């Protein structure tokens, strides 16, 4: 079992662009009741992930790589829209910042996330990091699948 400790931020400028190549992600959700079950295609890889409920900014997470063809078939079981984005993994001060630039009905939304080892871990922010939105459910990918950014 893995504990995901994640914080999310808006971006205040585009100075992150061009630092690394992005990878196309497409994901959907099979369940969002007691846990969130997500199927994701990242580039040429498929994944299934089960996430528990968030407490503070931590939650249990189980993620497994699955065959790409299985991931594609599992999209047929989704009860949400597919969320598409480009993810950019940017190293900075000993951490990896994941910048998600959303597509489709979420176009225009760009979020940066950092995963930490503990909730009280200190970290440096790149100058392009803006306001923190950790805990604001509107910015959860699972929420964007049902309530896209274009409707805000």
Image: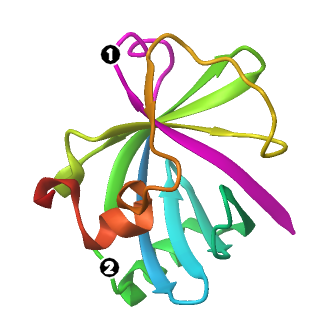
Q: Residue at x 56, y 79 (%)?
A: 37
Secondary structure under the numbered disc 2 in the rendered image: loop
| Up/down of 96 relative to 120, above or below | above
The circle on residue 32 is none
Quadrant location of the C terminus in the rendered image: bottom left
Query: Magenta residues, as a range?
Result: 1-22
Crowdedness of circle 2 by 10 Å Cα count: few (<14), some, many (20+)?
Answer: some
Image label count: 2
- Residue displayed at 55% across by 66% down: 68
Query: Position of 19 compared to 104: left or right?
Result: right
Local secondary structure at mark 1 = loop
Relative to 24, does residue 20 appear above or below in the rendering?
above
- Residue 69 lies left or right of residue 124; in this view the side is left
Q: Decide if residue 103 is on the left or right side of residue 24.
A: left
Q: Which residue is located at x 73 percent, y 24 percent?
A: 123
Measure the C-alpha gap from mark 2 to mark 1: 31 Å
Residue 128 vertical placement versus 52 (above, below): above
Q: Is residue 82 in sight in this rendering?
A: no
Q: Is residue 125 visible?
A: yes
Q: What x and y, as percent, mark residue 101? A: 34, 38
Q: What residue does disc 1 label?
A: 13
Q: Position of residue 28 (x, y in %)?
A: 41, 72
The residue at the point 64 percent across, 71 percent down is 49
* Classed neighbour count for the residue bearing mark 1: other residues with Cα under 10 Å, few (<14), some (14–19), many (≥20): few
- For label 2, the residue is 80
Q: Is residue 66 magenta?
A: no
In percent of width and height, residue 116 lies at 76, 40
Q: Position of residue 67 (x, y in %)?
A: 63, 69
Displayed quadrant of residue 95: top right
**First-in-chain label (2 vs 1):** 1
């Amino acid at each position: 079992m893995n504990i995901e400790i994640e914080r999310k931020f808006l971006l205040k400028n585009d100075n992150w662009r061009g630092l690394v190549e992005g990878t196309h992600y497409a994901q959907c959700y099979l369940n969002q009741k007691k846990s969130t079950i997500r199927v994701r295609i990242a580039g040429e890889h498929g994944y299934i992930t089960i996430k528990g409920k968030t407490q503070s900014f931590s939650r249990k997470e189980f993620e497994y790589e699955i065959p790409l063809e299985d991931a594609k078939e599992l999209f047929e079981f989704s009860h949400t829209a597919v969320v598409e984005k480009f993810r950019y993994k940017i190293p900075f001060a000993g951490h990896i910042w994941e910048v998600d630039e959303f597509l489709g009905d979420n176009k225009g939304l760009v979020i940066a996330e950092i995963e930490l080892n503990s909730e009280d871990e200190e970290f440096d922010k790149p100058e392009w990091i803006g306001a923190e939105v950790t805990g604001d459910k509107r910015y959860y990918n699972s929420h964007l699948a049902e309530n896209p950014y274009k409707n805000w």
